[in-house]
Image: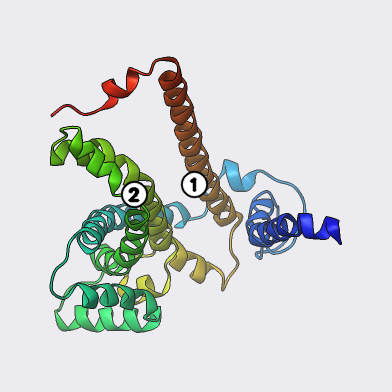
Amino acid sequence: MRWIRRHLLGVVAVLVLVYLFIPIAVVAVLSFNKPEGKYNTSWNRFSLDGWTNICGVPGVCDSFMISVRIGIVSTLVATVLGTMIAFALVRYRFRGRSSTNLLIFLPMATPEVVMGASLLALFLNLRFPLGEITIVIAHIMFIISFVVVTVKARLQGMDPRLEEAARDLYAGPRAAFRYVTLPLVAPGIAGAALLGFALSFDDFIISFFNAGTVVTFPIYIWGAAQRGIPVQVNALATLVFVVALLIVLISQFIGSRRRKALANEISQNPATIDALLPKS
């Protein structure tokens, strides 16, 4: 019982991680499969056809690049707008602030079917042609809420005395924001951007309602599932996961190296602190 109490949390954490990564592992393994028929659902034999001929099936790479392009544009716009909204909600007091906080959560709580159908009715009433632009507009609308919540949580957890200390050391508003506030909030903004891109790239329901003739990657997979998903889809999905994992690991590694280097430099030369302080 003593051993169980000591290692229970670690065992549960490992089991949860295994449970989360099993579907990803299945997708990665099936990307090296050579299926007998048109359905790539069971292991047959090892093959690299899905990786060496990743654009061999018509429409796979085209739909993939459309989803990437829509995700990048939607994420950039939603991150900028959501970050500004989060700063306004945390740092300023204004009339309607409580109502704004409540309204921010509505897109997150609204079912995607309702949002997709409502946006479709809006675009049709405005006689706005459906396509990539309507998908981008729709994605921005629901990504902003997630960005605001993520950045807002980072701002609320930041110690305001750090900015006050920068002001006491004769840093102007812009210098304090550039050298103190922005570096502290940057991880939250980066996390919000990654989350927003994942939500945009993965979205099917809202995109399906407002895509018109445009075929995004999730829409392509939905259509291909009726006649058999090709191995190239598994390869592209594995590639996206590996790239996202590398980005996270590289950012963590760079941040850890910078913190260690700064700590060593300060410990060896205390005058470094004065050099790091922004000049007025």
| Residue 53 percent across, percent down from the top left | 56, 44
Residue appearing at x 59%, y 44% in the figure = 51
Query: Which quadrant of the rendered structure holds the C terminus?
Result: top left
Q: Mark 1: give few (<14), some (14-19) or many (20+) Cα within 10 Å.
A: some
Residue 159 is tagged as 2
Q: Is residue 269 above or below residue 25?
A: above
- Residue flagged by tag 2: what amino acid is it? Asp
Q: Is residue 18 above or below residue 128?
A: above
Q: Residue furthest front?
A: 168
Q: Secondary structure at mark 1?
A: helix
Residue 57: horizontal and vertical position, in percent?
Answer: 52, 54
Drawn side of residue 91 relative to residue 54, left or right: left
Q: Where residue 202 appears, x then y in whole percent?
A: 45, 63
Q: Let me know if residue 212 appears in the view.
A: no
As drawn, the residue found furthest toward the right would be: 1
Mark yes or no: residue 268 visible: yes
**CA neighbours of label 2 inside 10 A, class few (<14), some (14 to 19), many (20+):** few
Q: Say which residue label 1 marks.
A: 244
Q: Nearer the viewer, residue 277 or 231?
A: 277
The reply, left or right, for residue 203 in relation to residue 169 is: right
